[in-house]
């Protein structure tokens, strides 16, 4: 589970596609000093399992289902900077909302309107998930 609050950002430094699996290597942030193999980390909001790591990098493998629902490809991940969030410890304060990081569908930005000093983002969603969306419900974007 995640709060949906981005901890930090880091670049994807390498990617390799083999047998329908996309392996991505991300520069390891300095504050990610408590990670271990198998940890769940939200990468651009997508819950991924940490496959390997060293002092400088984090490596994740994205299978066919994850690639299908996220639209990630070898071509669009290279040199990309991603948002990162480690999974919650439920004995800590939760500063956002509980979100799983599982991708159910992709939306499309339909409008970005200025309202005073804020922005209103309008996102179109597939009708298949419309019954699960309600006012004031938590949705990770």
Image (cartoon, rainbow, N blue to C red):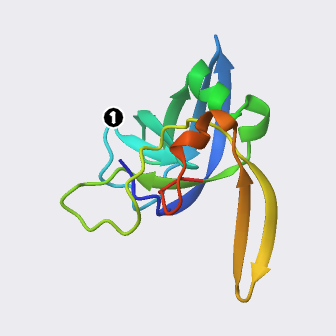
Question: Residue drawn at (33%, 34%), measured in percent from left and top?
Answer: 37
- Residue at the bottom extreme of this rendering: 116
User: Which sits in the foreground, 67 or 137?
Assistant: 137
Residue 13: x and y, percent?
65, 43
Residue 136, placed above or below residue 102: below
User: Which sits in the foreground, 120 or 61?
Assistant: 120
Residue 128: x and y, percent?
63, 33
Question: Residue drawn at (57%, 44%), measured in percent from left and top?
Answer: 26
User: Which sits in the foreground, 24 or 46?
Assistant: 46
Residue 120 in sight: yes
Residue 12, placed above or below residue 51: below
Residue count near mark 1 (Cα–Cα under 10 Å), binned few <14, some 14–19, many ≥20:
few
Q: Secondary structure at mark 1?
A: loop
Which quadrant holds residue 119? bottom right
Residue 47, placed above or below residue 134: above
Horizontal arrangement in the rendering, residue 47 relative to residue 71 (left or right): left
Residue 130: x and y, percent?
61, 42
Which quadrant holds residue 32? bottom left
Residue 122: x and y, percent?
73, 61
Residue 70 in sight: no
Residue 132, placed above or below residue 98: above
- Residue at the left extreme of this rendering: 91
Label 1: which residue?
A: 37
Which quadrant holds residue 107? top right
């Amino acid at each position: 589970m995640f709060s949906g609050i981005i901890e930090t950002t880091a670049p994807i430094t390498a990617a390799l596609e083999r047998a329908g699996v996309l392996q991505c290597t991300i520069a390891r942030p300095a504050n990610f000093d408590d990670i271990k193999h198998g940890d769940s980390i939200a990468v651009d909001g997508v819950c991924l399992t940490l496959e390997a790591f060293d002092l400088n990098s984090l490596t994740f493998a994205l299978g066919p289902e994850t690639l299908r629902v996220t639209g990630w490809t070898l071509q669009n991940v290279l040199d990309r900077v991603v948002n990162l969030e480690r999974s919650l410890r439920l004995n800590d304060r939760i500063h956002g909302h509980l979100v799983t990081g599982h991708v159910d569908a992709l939306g499309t930005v339909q409008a970005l309107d200025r309202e005073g000093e804020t922005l209103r983002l309008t996102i179109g969603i597939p009708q298949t998930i419309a019954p699960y969306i309600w006012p004031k419900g938590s949705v990770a974007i």
